[in-house]
Every structure is written in C-alpha cells, then in structure tokens.
Amino acid sequence: MNLEKRQKIYRSIMLVILSVLITFITTTVVLYKYLKADGNIKYILVSDNDSSIGAEISKLRTIIDQYYLGEIDDEKLKEGAISGYINALGDEYTAYITKEEYDEFQANIMGNYVGIGIYMSVYKNSDEIVIIAPIKNSPAEKSGLKSGDIITKVNGIEYSGVDGMEIASDQIKGEEGTTVDIEIKRNEEILNYTITREKVIMNPITAEVLENNIGYIQLISFDENCSQEFKEKYEELQIKGIKSLIIDLRNNGGGIVQEALTIADYIVPKYKTLMVTVNKTENEVTEIAEQEPIITMPVIVLVNENSASASEILVGALKENGCAKIVGTKTFGKGVIQEILKLADGSALKLTTEEYFTPNRNKINGVGIDPDVIVELPEDVLPSYSIERTKDTQLNKAIELLKEE
C-alpha cells in the first residue's frame, strides 16, 4: 500500500471519528425547564439535536454582522426566530407568546385589560373584521362604535382575516391614557374615531326576562370566574319567576374550558359524560358531571358559525345528554385544546395538546355541531349582538319553541 492510499484511509477514518464525536455532542440530552401556569416548575428531557438550525442561523448572523446597515435588536431577532420555528408546525392554534403578550393574555382572562373595549370576530366569507359588541361603559361604547361595524384600519394600516384581527387587536391595546385611531365601515359610510385607551372591566354575561317568563342569558366568552357569574345571573332570573331558559352562545369564540364544563355541570345530571379528550399518546380522559343539576327547566341554546371551542364543549354536553335543544346554524368546529406553558423568562408556548369529542365521541374539530333546529338570520342582518328583536329569527324561534313546552 503506497503512502497516498494510506493517507486517504487515515483521513477517512478521522472523518468518521469526527462525525461520531459531533453527532454525540449535538444530540446530548439536556434538561429543559418551564414554569407551568399553576406556578409549578416542570423539567422535560429534550434532545438538543437542532444544531443544523443553529448553524444556519449562525451563518446568517455572520452575514448580517458583516453587511447589514441598520441597528440589530438581538431580542427581536430571538423572538422572531422562535416564532417562525413554532409557526412552521402549521397549527393555526399553536404559537409562541412573548412575555408582554403573555402578561396581556393573563389580564384578558382575568376579565380586565387596557384598550378600547370591543369584542371582534372575522366574517368567514369576506375576511372582514367585525365588531361583535363594544363592552358596556368602555371607551369604544362611549365613542359611538357599534355592533356590526367593520374595522378597516387601525392607526392608518388596513387589516383583514384572522391574522389581521390578531395584529389589529394588539394595536388597539396599549398604555392607559394613550390614543388609537380606528377607521370603520358602517353600511357604506366610512367613519374615523380617535379613542383613548382605558382599563376595561370585561363583562361577558348579560341576563333578562323575556315574554312568557323565559329567562335569557347571553354569554360572550368564557373568561375567568364566568361560571360563577352565570350561576348568579340564573339565580336572579329564577327569583323573578322564569320557567325556561335561553342561553345565547352566538359569536362566543370560547375561552377557559373549565368554565364551560362548570356551566355544563349546572345542567347535566350527575355522573353523565360532559366531554372526552385524547392526547398525543391516545390517552383518553372522560370528564363527567360531578353534582346534581341546579337547572332543570327547559333550555334552548342559540349558536352560529362563530360559536367555537369552549362553546362547542358546552353545546355538545347539553345536546347529547338531552338537556337542551340547540337552535341556529352549525358551529365553528374548533375541537382542540391549547395548553399555555409559561417559560422561565416569562414568555410562553400556546400548544395544541388535546383533541376533544362530544359525550358520544363525535368529532368536533373541523366539523362543528349541527343544531337540532336550523334557523338562518335574514340576509340583511349581520350576526352581531345588537340584532333588532323583530329580525332575530333565531331568538324568536327559541321563544316560540319554549312557549310550546
């Protein structure tokens, strides 16, 4: 064997050894720590095998450092890289949440935040961002914004679609005392408002007595402690002598799952199934009613295409246990649950961890729930919270059905 061949063999052997060594280093198991929402620290064993990603980013950073003219914000670069990594999962409900966004999220679910005070949604057919309702006594209501107004611009920038709504929502929030410019379309008229942000107390539940002693509870979202408020509103209506109940979940996009389950527990008989969840390892968990129901009168639930997530949990539990009649149009079809995993630096991951099914194990995600009685709104009526009663065909149908009970 000549010298040149021996050198080639030697180089090949060294490359193999070097490759094994690099592989060992880059796949070393490390402890990853995150702080759960309940305050407990949890450690997960993860394999740090993303060296190729790190290497690519390192190459890009070298080029940026060498040629980029502007200033470099390392924190924004880090957040952008993490967001892009998580977004590439392709799950519309999974996201990286910065510390600032997490703090705002906590304020929202606790029922108060700083902003102008509106509930928003997106029309599926047009991608327009619509004001579902201004919150009572909020800056939005005081300024004259109304249910059904289409938000076209925030601070001079046009927004549309689900992603646009999220960005617009972030722009609408801000420090107390600062202002935001909102352009809206009302019918064919374009209107502009400059609104001062304030601390807004969320009030997701309203209640009243309708004709024939029919109770009516409108639930806009499942915020923290809303189940307790729902119970209090029901008891107030009960004192006023109601004989039946309408629960309006139209345009309710969800919220805290446990709040929806607690409300279901007020109505569904003890030990009956409320929902079934399945996680990544196909471990199945069945949620059951834990108490005797406090609501035993006839119940009708109003739904539409914007009734989603926790709303669908409540609808499925009531419908399939025979505890309520569902009136309206097919629900949205969001049958997955996200867990908020708070990280040690104050940021968080909103991660889809479970899929949920109705008590009879019917699929909801991407499917929705069909009402027992399908009722469309008139074509000239927007699905907002301020529908004129005479034109609200869905509510009027519910009243008609309860009169027959």
Image (spheres, helix red, strand yellow):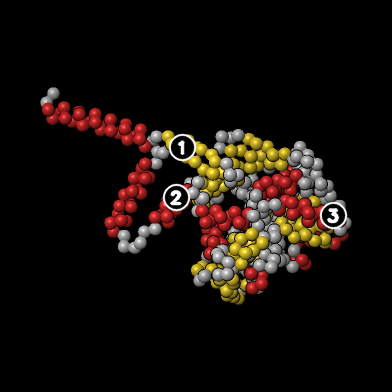
Q: Is tag 3's residue or tag 2's residue first in the polypeptide sequence?
A: 2
**Towards the viewer: 322 or 379:** 322
Q: Amino acid at mark 3?
A: Gln
Tag 2's secondary structure? helix
The kind of secondary structure element at disc 3 is helix
Residue 352, given in percent of the width and then of the height, sits at 56, 45
**Contact between labelled residues 3 and 1, with CB atoms less than 8 Å apart:** no
Residue designated by label 2 = 82
**Extreme residue toward the left, this view:** 2
- Disc 3: which residue: 238
Q: Is residue 323 left or right of residue 47?
A: right
Q: Amino acid at mark 1?
A: Leu
> Circle 1 — which element?
strand
Disc 2: CA contacts within 10 A as few (<14), some (14-19) or many (>=20): some
The residue carrying mark 1 is 31
Gap in Å between the C-alphas at discs 1 and 3?
A: 54 Å
Q: Amino acid at mark 2?
A: Ile
Mark 1 neighbour density, 10 Å: few (under 14) some (14–19) many (20 or more) = few
31 to the left or right of 189: left
Camera-near label (1 vs 3) is 1
Q: Residue furthest top?
A: 1
Pair 2/1: label in front? 1
Along the viewing direction, whichever of 73 and 237 lies nearer the viewer: 73
**Badge 3 density bin: few <14, some 14–19, many ≥20, Cα 10 Å:** some
Q: Are marks 3 and 2 in contact (CB under 8 Å)?
A: no
Image coordinates for residue 90, horizontal then vertical, percent: 49, 48
